Amino acid sequence: MKAKRFHYPGYDIIDDYGDDQFETTSPKKLDAYLEKILSKKKRFAGKELLPLIVEALNNELELKFVENNLFTVLGFCLQFIIKGPSTERQLALNALGLLAMTIDNEDDARELYRSSLAVLSETLNSGTETLKILGSLAMITFFCANYSNETEEPMKIIWTFLDADSDNEVARKHSSAVLAAAISAWSFLLTTMETWRLSEEHWQGAISYFTNVLEEGDESVHVAAAEALAQIFEIDCLKKFSTLVDCSLCEEDRTLMEGLLKEELKNTIAEKLKARDEDSARQGTTANLDVLNYFENGTAPEAVTIGEDGLELYTWSQILRVNFLKNLLGEDRVEKHIMEKEYLHYIFSVRPTTFNPSNVELYIPFREEATVRYFYKTAMSPNSFIAKKRTQLRNKQRLISEEDKASHFLDNDDGIQLA
């Protein structure tokens, strides 16, 4: 049977249908071990290489490995996602999400987004590894999409997958786990959107849809829908999420109408939350209690603490972001990435304690005090931050390294430590 060629920039995969043999061509010389693994049969290559890639990205933060082998690793992962056994497919999806979080070059991030989106959108409806696909799609979009339309495209893919615009009641075509994961992925991406950039037409059924989902019996689905609604009301732009706002009214009348409608909807949502069983809602998960208090009393969610420095998140967008990543990667790994990756400091609006490997006490002006024990809500999209900061951080890190080295030298005459 004729071989099928998958092409990515700098990387070709030739796959003979039904044959385990495949070959790779690359304009750059790969690391010796990587080249050795890829030269083996596919059934062995995936089992041997993919765990190493995931481990390197998850624990060792191997930026050099990513830089040198980006397109090879990308093509390798996409091949197993398109046509691979379940174990390798899951590993490849994990690797893609971690790769998106690791890339610090804007052009590479854009290529990862472009190459992965079509593959993931096609495989989402395949019925296998759906949870992993949703997680990978959300991660790649969150970290690699540069513009609002690039973020909304995967959101629309998830929305269509949920069949959220259907006139029927909430369909049970998805399992509770998949339904909860899809809603969480959509909400996670919504946290990156600037209000004025949101489409006027795509999400007008969102409040109605999630309010109906609140009646679902499964706790995970209920919590996901409740948090999505809290995020929508925190954004405070009702006309983007409800068809009940009459946009033909003058601005003053529309503002008045939105205010009244907002209170009515919040009361309806609060009643639905309590109707599930008030006792279990108040004594159950923190998320349920926080959301109920938010819609009943306007109370902010309970702060979530990150890391040993007591860094805290106070808004729904911040909490949804970090909780989504924790569910995918685990709490310890998320904290490690947030504390060690500088561009994530911009996304989560945090400046962790400065790491000084030399143990030399450096002078730091008060306004640049190393430990800042709070998060603040950012007006810009995290995607905007990533796009602008990726290429700048490399140079900045090099300058910081040079300054740290310079700080080790002391003035021989007066013993003053240089900063």
Image (cartoon, rainbow, N blue to C red):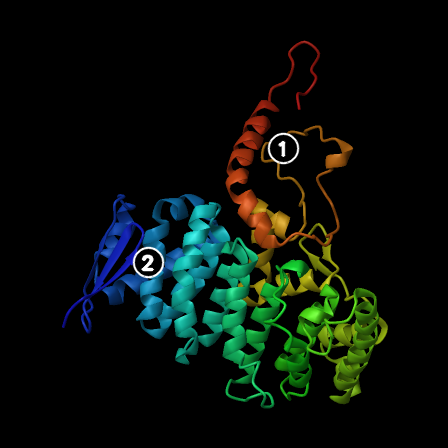
Estimate the x, y position of residue 152 in percent, counting from the top left: 55, 64
Identity of the amino acid at label 1? Asn
Identity of the amino acid at label 2? Gly
Along the viewing direction, whichever of 110 and 16 lies nearer the viewer: 110
At a point 63% along the width and 59% down the height, the residue shown is 197
Question: Tag 1: Cα neighbours inside 10 Å, few (<14), some, or many (≥20)?
Answer: few
At a point 62% along the width and 86% down the height, the residue shown is 218
Whether residue 225 is situated above or below residue 113 in the rendered picture:
below
Estimate the x, y position of residue 311 in percent, counting from the top left: 71, 53
Q: Which mark is residue 359?
A: 1
Instruction: Pick the quarter of the image with the N terminus.
Output: bottom left
Q: CA distance from mark 1 to mark 2?
A: 42 Å
Residue designated by label 2: 75
Along the viewing direction, whichever of 108 and 327 lies nearer the viewer: 108
Nearer the camera: disc 1 or disc 2: 2
At a point 76% along the width and 81% down the height, the residue shown is 269
The answer to whether one can see residue 16 in this image is: yes
In terms of secondary structure, where does tag 1 sit? loop
Question: Tag 2: Cα neighbours inside 10 Å, few (<14), some, or many (≥20)?
Answer: many
Estimate the x, y position of residue 117 in percent, counting from the top left: 43, 64
User: Furthest-top residue in view?
Assistant: 413
